[in-house]
Image (cartoon, helix red, strand yellow):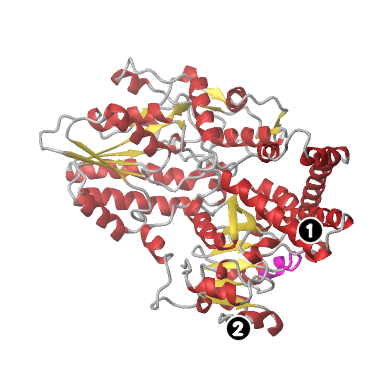
Amino acid sequence: MGDPRGTRRILVTGGSGLVGRAIQKVVEDGARLPGEDWVFVSSKDADLTDAAQTRALFQQVQPTHVIHLAAMVGGLFRNIKYNLDFWRKNIHINDNVLHSAFEVGVRKVVSCLSTCIFPDKTTYPIDETMIHNGPPHSSNFGYSYAKRMIDVQNRAYFQQHGCTFTAVIPTNVFGPHDNFSIEDGHVLPGLIHKVHLAKSDGSALTVWGTGRPRRQFIYSLDLARLFIWALREYDEVEPIILSVGEEDEVSVQEAAEAVVEAMDFHGEVTFDTTKSDGQFKKTASNAKLRAYLPDFRFTPFKQAVKETCAWFTDNYEQARNHTHSSLEPTRERQQSLGSVSSQDNANSWSLCPATRLDSAAAAGKVEAEHVLASAPSDRNLCRFRAMGCQTTHSNLEVLHSCSLVFFATKPHILPAVLVEVAPAVTAEHILVSVAAGVSLSTLEKLLPPMARVLRVSPNLPCIVQEGAMVMARGCCAGSYEAQLLRSLLEACGQCEEVPEAQVDVHTGLSGSGVAFVCAFSEALAEGAIKMGMPSGLAHRIAAQTLLGTAKVLLQKGQHPAQLRTDVCTPGGTTIYGLHVLEQGGLRATAMSAVEAATCRARELSRNPSPVVAQVPSVLPALQGEGALAHREHSSVARS
């Protein structure tokens, strides 16, 4: 890119995604040339579906060159369901980016297309001349046609204005920072996540489809190097396919085997043939690329898979493991979810209906006047009024007035409530269920497809701000929604994000564990009572011993076995007592108790019934001056 006109400022849209992160790494690892200024942006910097925000971004950055990666993307099954959404959003994004680039005088744009744009019925291998020869596969026609239109726009901008706007067509990309969602990710990252879970749970690996479809996979770091080459050296307006050769095409079954090998998985592998295979193959020719770069060396497939699996395992908590087909929240929307001020509208945070949620973040994150609670009876609402919250008997009023809504009903009542409010749910709502045993899939079936749903499993110690909670995201809830919810619930204790499969384990460990700990505390105290200590004193000391021990474990980050060893003197009292506990089977009994409670939770999740309502797993009431005083020093996140 020997441009004589000074510094080259390169804007990369979609800079936080799979390919954007890969380009950033390659640039940082030495690919940057003197005079190059790289700017990586994501939808947190601007909503590219909005023309004004896109124009403002380009005017602020003043790029000379653009790599356009931003898109609304999703896996096969989400594309099948939401073709219109994929069409509309991507058309807006692409038109706004290309026109803004033209308006500020960008010298070159390289956009990212996809092999899914090629006709479904065609001859193989496909090449760059065949893009518009017929309709794409019906499973993702919305996304495919929107991407095709970039090629049309590029040729039109060149014909009418002489712009050097071009595009590249990568095959199936994978690598670090991919979307590893099982429901919404592409085939290879989805397989990696599935194998990780199967290995962790000791379960079988189920691969969707027959395993016969074939794909050309390209490692994201290889693609990044090719993108940089295209930006600097490829000056044709016609697109170019960036792909490994036809000889490197692999089947889904072979891809699964590579992941299984890389992750050292030894469990059973099955294929669910009731799931769609999608397009059988879309073999692409890289002859044009080889004419330009005959000596380019791609990373061997198994090596790339191994590196990706290692990255995913090392970064599991930060990886994109959950479905999120729409764009991340924009900066404007993030600011609207900031702290409440005196100018903010009330009724920004809601409880629907108000049963025993008095509330999660009311202990320190939410000002009472910004809470709207709904319940059919005044008896359930009186505690909210006493705290200064607003109340209503209308669940629909909650949805019309608020954007963050907690559903704190008894489990067997929740479906009726969701059916009632579903017509009022929009894409702006964040919906949180604290109903025990009601799965995310059940919630999403009863709500509109774009609903952003999360599920929270709390436990009793939330009432003293020492709870142990977990949450799981639905298919349309992203990392931002999870971060918002966590920031609210941290006022009630510790909140961890987990795959939904672990929510029932949390019920067995922490929900039921409260009773297990109480039983152990009671037994400790009764042992002291038997030896002559007054009952009240014995129970207080037993409880304080549990509390103090837990604090030491958490603050020091020690494994319990290490702390246990530290307090065991050879021949001393503790080792004698532990010997008796082991003889009584304490360890095995405790493990069996957690296992039994978890199995029962899973059973109730599969077969919900009114019985579940006898043990409602909702955030308990936070009443009294302590909770109110704590709340005065905090602010609520709102939308």
Residue ID at (49%, 74%): 632
Query: How many residues crowd around disc 1 within 10 Å: few (fewer than 14), some, or many (20 or more)?
Result: some
- Is residue 484 shown in magenta? no
Nearer to me, 316 or 603: 316
Residue under circle 2?
385
- CA separation in Å, label 2 and label 1: 32 Å
Q: Quadrant of residue 547?
A: bottom right
- Relative horizontal placement of residue 25, taking residue 370 as reference (left or right): left
Residue under circle 1?
608
- Is residue 413 shown in magenta? yes
- Relative horizontal placement of residue 435, taking residue 136 as reference (left or right): right
Query: In this view of the protein, can residue 447 be seen by the observer?
Result: no
Q: Secondary structure at mark 2?
A: helix
Q: Which residues are magenta?
A: 410-417
Residue ID at (19%, 41%): 107
Residue 227 vs 153, above or below: the answer is above
- Relative horizontal placement of residue 616, taking residue 427 as reference (left or right): right
Q: Which mark is residue 357?
A: none
Of mark 2 and mark 1, the one earlier in the sequence is: 2
Nearer to me, 343 or 247: 343
Percent position of residue 214, x then y = 55, 26
Percent position of residue 315, x then y = 51, 37
Residue ID at (55%, 48%): 323
